[in-house]
Image (cartoon, helix red, strand yellow):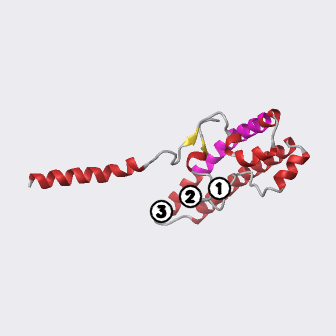
Amino acid sequence: MKKKLLVMTVMMSLFLTMPALAFGPGSGRCLCDDQGFMDYHRGILRKLNLSDEQRAKMEDLWVSVQREVRPLREKMFDASVELRRLWLEASPDEHKINAAQKEIRKVRETISDKMTSMRLEMRNILTPEQNKKLAGSRWDWGRNRGMGYGPRGGERGPNVPCPGKYF
């Protein structure tokens, strides 16, 4: 009886600790090096042969926009949590839900406008030849995506930039 209890306890503890041990190297870890934006978009930017001055301007622009957008993303997250809370009420209030959705749309629109402005400013940093290369590359300024958003097609795992680097 005691042996069965001991075996069951060991097996249960192994079963419960397995998820913690399953997290391997490179799974969701960030690149906390000095490359930042340039490393995140290394594929296309390497093909553009940017000068040191261009790299510095792009990095500064990226950092400044990320600092501006972060509070907006936090506001959008808070509004999303509030919307979720409103939907979970026993009798949801239609006006409150619509107001929360409008706030989320407004913040998303503001973020989108800021990102568009950043992309246009980055295009102004490039030379005409570099802009032609960029236009022909089918590259998304938001992320250098492959075939999708998941682990096989998007920037995941060890290629995720360190979120704490700029803030």
C-alpha gap between disc 2 and disc 1: 9 Å
Q: Using a 10 Å C-alpha cutoff, classify the residue at mark 1 as few (fewer than 14 neighbours), some (14 to 19) or many (20 or more).
A: many
Local SS, label 3: loop
Question: Which numbered disc, 3 or 1, marks the residue that appears first in the sequence?
Answer: 3
Q: Using a 10 Å C-alpha cutoff, classify the residue at mark 2 as few (fewer than 14 neighbours), some (14 to 19) or many (20 or more).
A: some
Question: Where, quadrant-wise, is the C terminus in this rendering?
Answer: top right
> Looking at the image, do the residues carrying marks 2 and 1 touch, with CB atoms under 8 Å apart?
yes
Q: Quadrant of residue 53 in the image?
A: top right
Return the residue found at the far right: 128
Q: Which mark is residue 83?
A: 2
Which three-letter amino acid code belongs to the residue tagged 2? Leu
Q: Which mark is residue 89?
A: 3
Can you identify the residue that label 1 sits on?
A: 104
Magenta segment range?
A: 56-78
Local SS, label 2: helix
Q: Quadrant of residue 95 in the image?
A: bottom right
Depicted 146 relative to depicted 161: above or below: below
- Left or right: 37 with respect to 11? right
| x 31%, y 52%: residue | 16
